[in-house]
Image (cartoon, grey):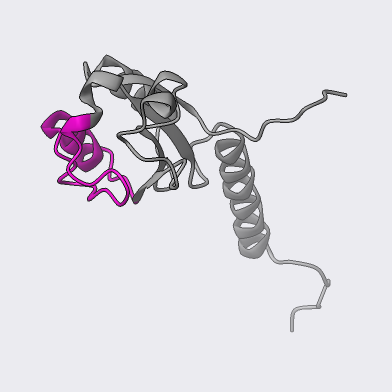
Amino acid sequence: MARYRGGLGRGRRRTAFYSSLLLLALLLLAGCGLFSGEEVLIAIRPENIPLLSNPGDPDLLNTGIPSLDDLNRRWEVEAMLPLYPDVSPDDEIAIQNGLAGVFKLVLPPFTDVDQLIEEYEADAHVAYAEYNEPATAFEK
């Protein structure tokens, strides 16, 4: 009869080790923006804002700009929300100050955000694409 030594057996130690490695990898990916759902801001060039079919509540796959629809489809964008929902796309002052045509894209987990930003910025209809990061008035 085998004597009980306590603790985890060899198989369970191995499982715990690999589980720890997986958890560490997921935490590292989360820090790189590849794991957690990310948000990116994009701005449509002012001359292209009139092309948007419904700027207040855009349809991800039918924005009125086919190249943007293709990018949203390719990157499996989960939501496209106006950053300033109360701003009219016809408001000249808002357009001049960069408030019209700015959208927040909600992305699925494991998205390569750097590559996505590069591809959106390459689109002729997009003025810029950038991470949606919280802004602070003062840095410590």
- Residue 28, picture quadrant: top right
- In the displayed structure image, the side of residue 20 where residue 98 appears, left or right: left
Residue 106 visible (yes or no):
no
How many dots with numbers?
A: 0
Q: Residue at x 49, y 41 (%)?
A: 38
Residue 60 appears at what percent x and percent y? 24, 47
- In the displayed structure image, the side of residue 92 where residue 9 appears, left or right: right
- Residue 41, picture quadrant: top left
Q: Residue at x 36, y 32 (%)?
A: 91
Q: Is residue 130 above or below residue 77?
A: above
The C terminus: image quadrant: top right
- Residue 134, picture quadrant: top right
Residue 104 appears at what percent x and percent y? 43, 40
- In the displayed structure image, the side of residue 45 where residue 128 appears, left or right: right
Residue 2 appears at what percent x and percent y? 75, 79
Q: Nearer the viewer, residue 115 or 92?
A: 92
Q: Residue at x 20, y 42 (%)?
A: 73
Q: Residue at x 32, y 48 (%)?
A: 56
Q: Is residue 76 above or below residue 48?
A: below
The N terminus: image quadrant: bottom right
| 76 in the magenta segment | yes
Q: Nearer the viewer, residue 13 or 79?
A: 79
Residue 110 appears at what percent x and percent y? 43, 42
Residue 65 visible (yes or no):
yes
Farthest bottom residue?
A: 1
Write the start and end of the magenta stretch as one range. Answer: 50-78
Q: Is residue 4 above or below residue 23?
A: below
Decide whether the magenta segment is chiefly helix, strand or loop.
Answer: loop
